[in-house]
Each structure stands twice: as structure tokens, then as C-alpha cells.
Image (cartoon, rainbow, N blue to C red):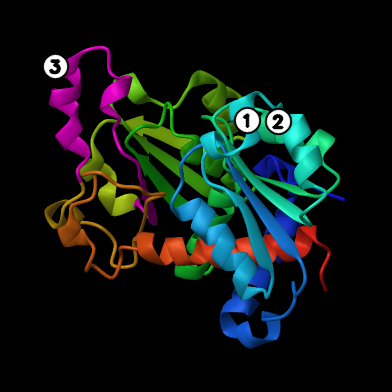
């Protein structure tokens, strides 16, 4: 029995296999309709989520399985003080696989040590969100046809964004990846990501505060929101917040085959007028999330 807690627990070969299965599901959905018949997925969401929870539920239903669970801690025995380990052990009696989101970093790992069924980490605090990373990788593969030899720009909050950290970790294992890190000085990639991931893997990278200046270089632009609550100084926030709003004007010098990704939800960092640009991939990215989660459920349940 195997769980998925951290994207680095998957080898690049396993990631490539998951992407291949997801692409086969997209091409031949009818083949997969009954693959998880009589199987049950429990969604244990101790904090709110729209996309991730519904994506897991849709994935299991489309595999012919069933879903049970809760969408907030208040509607679970956690409200009575039950431990994560006890919850996992109990729910293992009812379900074949568990997807868990929790505000505390490490909670899904604790659950995986107690559960008797596979656990999928659906986000733990600011730590890991491996299925979002798989979604991002599938989207890049589908949009660009490859996962190597790409210039990837990350823009916005690179300090606190768990999706950014996880995707950089995943991309560090592919060849020819160049990173362009675009953020205010206050929200640069943390030192440990720079040292332990980017520099340790010898990745080509540069840091800048100017999005338009680097736009012509990018194959992928991964947007994230600049979060007001991360600033100590309101003046700094007001000075910087609009510098990373993506508009059609800022895409003037971008490549014709640029792929614009965003883990969502967005606030105002991509203007809605960009949505109609064929390079805007973020809603296709949402759909890809369902397909990669279907592939992952099949893998962890060892369904042929």
C-alpha cells in the first residue's frame, strides 16, 4: 500500500506514467468508466476547498466509484478533539482510499502512518500540494508537448506559494529547465528553495521585479496572487500590487505559444480580458486536475 504525501516521493518515470494514463483517460473515457466500481473515496477536508475537493469527487465518480466525507473540520469528530491518526484509522474501515486537506503541515503524513488505505495529500498548510503539481505538469505537457527544455516564469508571491515551491521541485528533475523568478523583493523565493532545490540541481535561473522585460523569453508563465496579508507595510503593498496584474497589453511581446497557468483562485492578478486569449490555460488546467487525479487513484488502488 502506498500513499502520496509529497511530489518528490514520485520518480520522474512514475510522473510520466501518470501523465500517460491521464492522456489515455482523456482520449478513451469509456474504457475507464467502471474501473473503480464498488470502490469508495473518502474526502477529509479540514479546511475549505472548491476545486480540489470537487475535482477528487468528480474523478472518483467518473471511474465508477463512490464518495463519502466532509468539507470542513466542524462537521467531523475533529470538533470533539479526535486526533488525525484516529480519524484516519476509523475512516480506513469505510473507504478504499482517502484524500485529505488539513491546515497543519504534516497532518496527511501522520494520517498515512495510521491508515490502512492509501492517503493522498490534498494540501497541508503552506507545505505540499502534490496533486496540484501533477495537474500543472500534465497541463505543461499537453500545452507544450514536453516537460524539458522550457523557460518557466513564476510571477507574484514566490515566498509563501506552496504551488510554486512544489512545481519548482518537480521541474528540477527535468533537463533544460530555465527559471525566471518575477516578484517584489519582499516575496522572493525562500533561500532554502534557492539553495536546496534550484542551485543543488544546477538549474539556470534569474530573479527580477519586471514582468514585461522578461515576457519575450517565457514558454510558460505561472501566475500567483500577491497576498495583501503578507505585507508588513500597506504602502509597499499598494505600490506593488498592480505591477503584476496580467493584461493583454503586457502580453504584446509574449511568444505566440506562451502557456499562462494559474493554480486559482485568482483575485485580480489576471485581468478577465486575458481569459479569451488562446494562451490562457488556467481553466483547461482545472479540467486536467480531474484527469490526473483519476490516474493517481487508479495507481494507488493498483487498478490495472
Q: Position of residue 132 (x, y in %)?
A: 53, 50
As drawn, 62 above or below 181: below
**N-term mark: 3 or 1:** 1
Residue topped by disc 1: 78
First reached walking from the N terminus: tag 2 or tag 1: 1
How far is disc 3 from disc 2 in space, using C-alphas? 41 Å
Secondary-structure class at tag 2: helix
The answer to whether residue 15 is above or below residue 171 is below
Q: Are marks 2 and 1 in contact (CB under 8 Å)?
A: yes
Sooner in the amino-acid sequence: mark 3 or mark 2: 2
Q: Residues within 10 Å of mark 2 (few under 14, many from 20)?
A: many
Q: Position of residue 144 (x, y in %)?
A: 47, 66
Q: Which mark is residue 112?
A: none
Residue 8 screen position, x and y as percent: 69, 41
State the separation of the CA atoms marked 2 and 1: 8 Å
Viewer-closest of 236 and 36: 36
Residue stretch in magenta: 218-245
Q: Nearer the viewer, mark 3 or mark 2?
A: 2
Asked whether, in this view, residue 67 is left or right of residue 146, the answer is: right
Q: Is residue 214 magenta?
A: no
Amino acid at each position: 500500500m502506498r500513499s502520496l504525501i509529497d511530489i518528490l516521493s514520485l520518480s520522474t518515470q512514475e510522473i510520466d506514467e501518470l501523465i500517460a494514463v491521464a492522456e489515455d483517460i482523456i482520449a478513451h473515457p469509456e474504457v475507464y468508466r467502471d474501473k473503480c466500481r464498488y470502490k469508495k473515496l473518502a474526502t477529509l477536508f479540514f479546511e475549505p476547498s472548491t476545486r480540489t475537493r470537487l475535482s477528487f469527487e468528480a474523478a472518483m465518480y467518473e471511474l465508477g466509484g463512490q464518495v463519502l466525507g466532509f468539507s470542513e473540520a466542524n462537521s467531523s469528530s475533529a470538533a470533539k478533539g479526535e486526533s488525525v491518526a484516529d480519524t484516519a484509522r476509523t475512516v480506513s474501515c469505510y473507504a478504499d482510499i482517502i484524500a485529505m486537506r488539513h491546515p497543519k503541515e504534516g497532518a496527511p503524513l501522520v494520517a498515512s502512518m495510521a491508515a490502512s488505505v492509501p492517503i493522498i495529500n490534498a494540501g497541508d498548510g503552506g507545505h505540499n500540494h502534490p496533486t496540484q503539481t501533477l495537474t500543472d505538469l500534465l497541463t505543461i505537457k499537453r500545452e507544450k508537448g514536453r516537460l524539458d527544455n522550457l523557460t518557466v516564469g513564476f510571477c507574484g508571491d514566490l515566498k509563501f506559494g506552496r504551488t510554486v515551491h512544489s512545481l519548482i521541485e518537480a521541474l528540477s528533475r527535468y533537463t533544460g529547465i530555465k527559471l525566471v523568478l518575477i516578484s517584489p523583493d519582499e516575496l522572493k523565493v525562500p533561500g532554502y528553495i534557492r539553495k536546496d532545490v534550484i542551485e543543488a540541481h544546477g538549474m539556470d535561473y534569474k530573479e527580477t521585479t519586471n514582468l514585461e522585460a522578461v515576457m519575450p523569453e517565457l514558454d510558460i508563465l505561472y501566475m500567483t496572487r500577491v497576498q495583501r496579508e503578507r505585507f508588513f507595510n500597506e504602502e509597499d503593498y499598494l505600490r506593488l500590487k498592480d505591477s503584476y496584474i496580467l493584461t493583454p497589453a503586457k502580453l504584446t511581446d509574449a511568444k505566440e505559444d506562451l502557456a499562462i497557468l494559474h493554480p486559482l483562485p485568482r483575485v485580480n492578478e489576471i485581468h478577465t480580458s486575458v481569459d479569451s486569449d488562446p494562451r490562457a490555460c488556467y481553466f483547461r488546467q482545472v479540467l486536467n486536475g480531474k484527469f490526473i487525479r483519476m490516474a493517481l487513484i487508479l495507481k494507488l488502488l493498483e487498478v490495472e
